[in-house]
Image: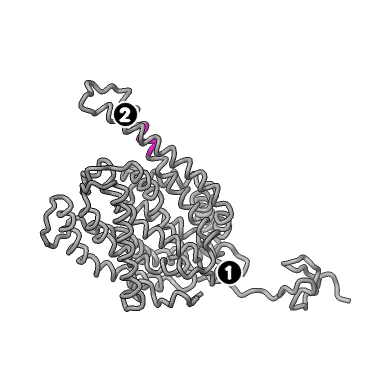
Amino acid sequence: MQSNSQQLHCANCGTVREKSNRFCVSCGTSTQSAPDIKCPACGADNSADAQACERCGGALQTTRASTRYHGLDALRGVAMLLGIVLHAALPYIPGIEAFWPADESSSYLLTTIFQFIHMWRMPVFFILAGFFANLVISRKSWSSWWGNRLLRIGLPIMVFFPLMGLTLPWIFKFGETGEFTFFYSNVGQPFHLWFLWHLMIFVIITALFRLPYLLSVKVLDGLNKIGLDFAGKVFRALGAFLSGILLRSRFPVVLIVACAVINVHAGGELIINPFATGLYFVVGYSLYSNSSLFTFLTAHWKYYLAAGIVVFALHTILTAVNAAVVTDIYGDNSTRVSEKESDLSDLLGLFIYLTKISGAVLFSYAFIGLSENKFGAYNAKLRFISDGAYWIYLIHLPIVTLITFSMLNLPVFAEAKFLIAVIITFITSVVSYKYFVRHSFIGILLNGRRYPMNERTS
């Protein structure tokens, strides 16, 4: 009989086992140690059960090496397709004529739909961009991700930049004047493709700072070897603390505050603020390595959705109240603006901004959890939409604007004109993708090789 020192416990069921046993006699779990995990950040080997790199403190991915996130793929596709809805609604939003050709009739229903989608669509897109960036880097390498982005983002920018300059300027002039005058112009670029430029900025920044990061890791290693490991411990502790409260918390209060601060100068609009989109990107990058938070979102998405709905309702009410206050202050019948009225408008504006940022984060977390909870399994139709969303988004703006501008001021309900534009744009774009793009070199460039809808690829 062997001594107690040779007896161990099964990691799965807790049954006492002999050290020499290769499998647990109760549950059959292998007792062999798993191979080391390589850190995607610094390349160091770590024990199989490590959650953070022992050298640099970076998060390790241990359980999702081959998982396909069908729900997140679908969510990313839906976020892109909703661009059609937003751009079809714009002519019917009150006060939009300052930068977009407007219809004589406006619709508060379409305005509310626009505000709801606009609140969370691009934040969730950049979170997913960071998530899938970490996925590629963890499964392959940084260089693979850089190359992938240059091919599938950089090249489309080069192709579609002149195409948009060739179509959108004269379409917008038609919307403003009713006259067809074909011409080329880069005024207004990059139009709806601004998010591609932001993603390329992230590629360039990570490429530039990759080497300094690796050098700093080696410096800390050197300090550890000579007994000066205090600096490394401080940096790792600080990084873990900041990551914990900003990126890994189930209650994203600090994240909301950070998003509000970093985007205050742009009023919450992401198009001119790569710092804000970069923060959302980092959130998604961290989420891929944070199995605990990802699992929590998947299980408890309803709570985030409920909170988001409450915040959006408050945002809508405050926006309406502020519009009434502004009208009262600056309307034609106003005589003298009191300091109290002006302060009230400023205070309402602050709360509107905070609810906008809060809704962006809450809805993003809710829809990420919802998509994986309800649509995490393979679905051929959703997969087709996910594959085609990139192409559809690239080409949709000239189509939807030409249709909506052609219907400006027609004696038809705004909602009816909106639906006509959405349906025609969607059908046209989907048909072009299915029959001319999906299996062509363009489809391979944008998404990689695609398979028939009834053929499951993963």
- Residue at 76 percent across and 71 percent down: it is 27
Picture quadrant of residue 402 = bottom left
Q: Position of residue 356 (x, y in %)?
A: 40, 43
| Image coords of residue 239 (percent x, y) | 50, 54
Q: Residue 458 has which mark?
A: none
Q: Which residue is mark 1?
A: 46
Q: Is tag 1's residue or tag 2's residue first in the polypeptide sequence?
A: 1
Question: Which element type, helix, strand or loop, lies under badge 2?
Answer: helix
> Label 1 vs label 2: CA separation?
60 Å
> Where is residue 227, by image quadrant?
bottom right
Nearer to us in this view, 399 or 3: 399
Does the stretch in magenta take in 404?
no
- In the displayed structure, does residue 337 sit left or right of residue 383? left
Res 329 visible: yes
Residue extending furthest toward the front: 411
For the residue pair 279 and 347, the one nearer the viewer reads as 347
User: Which of the image's four quarters has the N terminus?
Assistant: bottom right
Tell me residue 330's x, y (percent). Answer: 24, 28
Q: For the residue marked with disc 2, what is the amino acid?
A: Val
Magenta: predominant secondary structure element?
helix
Extent of the magenta region: 348-352
Residue 325 marker: 2
